[in-house]
Structures are given as structure tokens and as C-alpha cells.
Amino acid sequence: MAYNKSLPLVDLHRHLDGNIRASTIWQLAEKNHIELPANSLEELMPHVQIQKSEPDLLTFLAKLDWGVKVLATLDDVKRVAYENVEDAYNAGLHYTELRFSPYYMAMTHKLPVADVVAAVVDGINLGIKDFPVQVKLLGILSRTFGVEHCTEELNGILTHKDEITGIDLAGDELNFPGELFIDLFKTARDANMRITVHAGEAAGPESVWQAINLLGAERIGHGVNSYKDQALLDHMVKYNIGLESCLTSNYQTGTVKDLSLHPIKQFLANGNLVCLNTDDPAVENTEIKQEFNLAQQVLGFDHDQFTTLQENAVKMSFTSDTEKQALLQLTRHS
Ligand code: ADE
Ligand code: ZN
């Protein structure tokens, strides 16, 4: 097995709304009388799961759409949140940060955004009663829908701010640069939200600089293109800004054409804080252990590199030092 079993399995970059089971999409569509572009679950698969790779990020993201289109009630939202905890537990995770875009989940059936946040929180709380895995929640502002909808999202998230640990910016990075969201991230930071931002995935290193300097990012989602700017990599080392790498996702979005050349090698060699994550497990048909296997088979990573990646994940987690120590104790003797 590729990972270090005496350290916890952690997934910090995991979209709850990118991990809606195909079987659940099928069942919710039937219950809610929503027409799907398929006559069977098997036929549905290519509409909700990447088959090989996509030409770009937006084509990849379109595969998440059916998952949210079938969410017609708050109970449906609660169900997919609950199932996300079950999936995280079944994947062998000890700790995960689940991120979700409340507006994206709410928009098709015009559910109240703040109520969607509450339904996710309820589903997670039910889930962690049944499945022993530690979960924290991050609220996403979906840049694809513009500043106004992101404002609505942030307001909905902050209505339940005691249950939400941090804020992320996701979606169409090329057409909606970080500078548009400066005020919203200031509001989020003033509300004591931790900050991670998708950057350097569809756009270049300048987008990562914006995430750090304009939005206050403490971690960067993907950050693939950071490798093009050594000063940026060194700045991230100096200020402990972590990179959340997602190998399968980067291949499937067309960001990295040849996984054996993924810059995670360079990030590690440069001393950057970097860890392995899934991104959208159901859409990508992956799980965290598969990402470690890939790192072994395609990148040639060894036990020491897995140790570093797993220790980094704990360091990068949005938890207190006490919680980090407790997390490390969990697996110490197993
Ligand atoms: N939302 C879900 N997955 C994403 C990704 N890889 N990039 C940007 N937004 C996302
Ligand atoms: Zn992501």
C-alpha cells in the first residue's frame, strides 16, 4: 500500500457537490420527476463522470451539473451531505475538509442559499454520528456566477459561520480573476474564516499571487502553474502557504497533459508545503488511496515522500495545534 499507515489519511480538497453518487442522482431524479439524459444508471455514467480527460476546466466542471440539478429539496441536500461523510469514512479518511458552493447547490430549484448551508451542516452532523471521521466544512464562492451571487453565497455561509471553518473561491478562474473578489474575502477574513483559493489551475502564476496578496489565501487549491515562477514558490515556502495537489483532477481538466511531469515533484524538491487530495471523487472516479497509488506508480514517489505529504496535510489542515496533535496520535500505534 502506497501511503504511510502510521500517519493519518487526510483529504483537504474535496468538493461535497463534486461527490454526489451517480446512484443518488438517479434516485433523486426519479423522486423529483427530473428528466435525465439517460435511460439507465449505466447510461448516466458518462454524463456525471469523466471517462478519460477533458479539454479544459469548464468542460470538466460541467460533469458536476447533474449532481446539483436533482437537488429539489433541502432534504435532498441533507442526504448528499450525509452520504459524503459515509464516503469519506469508507475511503479510509481520518480527517477531511468538505467544501461546497451553496449557490450552485441551490440555484436550479431556487432553494434559499442560507437554508442550503443549514441543510449541509445538518447532514454532516448526522453523518459524523454514524461514521467516525473528522469533518470540517468550507464554503465556496463560485466565481463562475459573478460577484453578486458570490455575495449571496458569502452571506448565506456567514449566517452559519460557527459551523463553517473557511472560505474558498472555485469555478471559472480564467474569466473571473481573484481581484474581483477582494471585498468579499476581506469580509470573510474579518469574520475569522480561514482562506483557501483555487488558483494556478486554469490561469498562470499571476492568479496565485492575486490569491495570496489580494485575497489572503493561506492555502492554494491546485496551484499547478506556480512552478513557472520560482519567486512565487519561494514566497510560499517562506510564508507557509500550502499547495493542495490533486493529480487525477489535474489530468482530467487538461491542466497537466502528462501526469509523470506533474510539478508536485518540483514543489516537494523546493521544500513547499504540499499534500495529496481528490478534488471531486465521484466525478473523477477516484479516492485518496488511489491518488497515493498514482503518485507511486506514475511519479515514482517512495515511503519518505508519502510521509512528507501526509505530515504536510496535517500541518496544512484548518485545525488547532491541539487537534493536529490528536490527529497524529490516532494512527501512531496502528
Ligand atoms: N469545482 C470543482 N472542482 C473544481 C476545480 N478543479 N477547479 C475549480 N473549481 C472546481
Ligand atoms: Zn477543487
Image (tube, grey):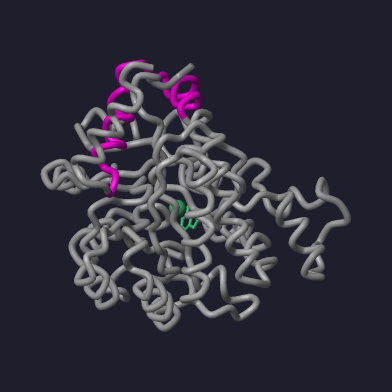
Seen from the viewer's position, the closer of residues 280 and 331 is 331
Question: Can you say which quadrant of the picture contains the C terminus?
Answer: top left
> In the rendered structure, which segment of residues is drawn in magenta?
292-318
* Outermost residue, bottom side: 148
Kindly tell me whether residue 63 is visible in this rendering: yes
Residue 66 vs 3, above or below: the answer is below
Q: Position of residue 331 (x, y in %)?
A: 35, 24
Which secondary structure dominates the residues rendered in magenta? Answer: helix
Image coordinates for residue 297, horizontal then vertical, percent: 49, 20
For the question of whether residue 263 can be seen, the reply is no
> Does 202 sit above or below residue 259?
below
- Residue located at (24% from left, 28% from top): 269
Residue at 31% in and 68% down? 178
Provide residue 30's location: percent of width, then percent of height. 82, 63
Residue drawn at the location 34% of the way across and 27% of the way down: 330
In the picture, measured across the screen, residue 39 lies left or right of residue 15, that is: right
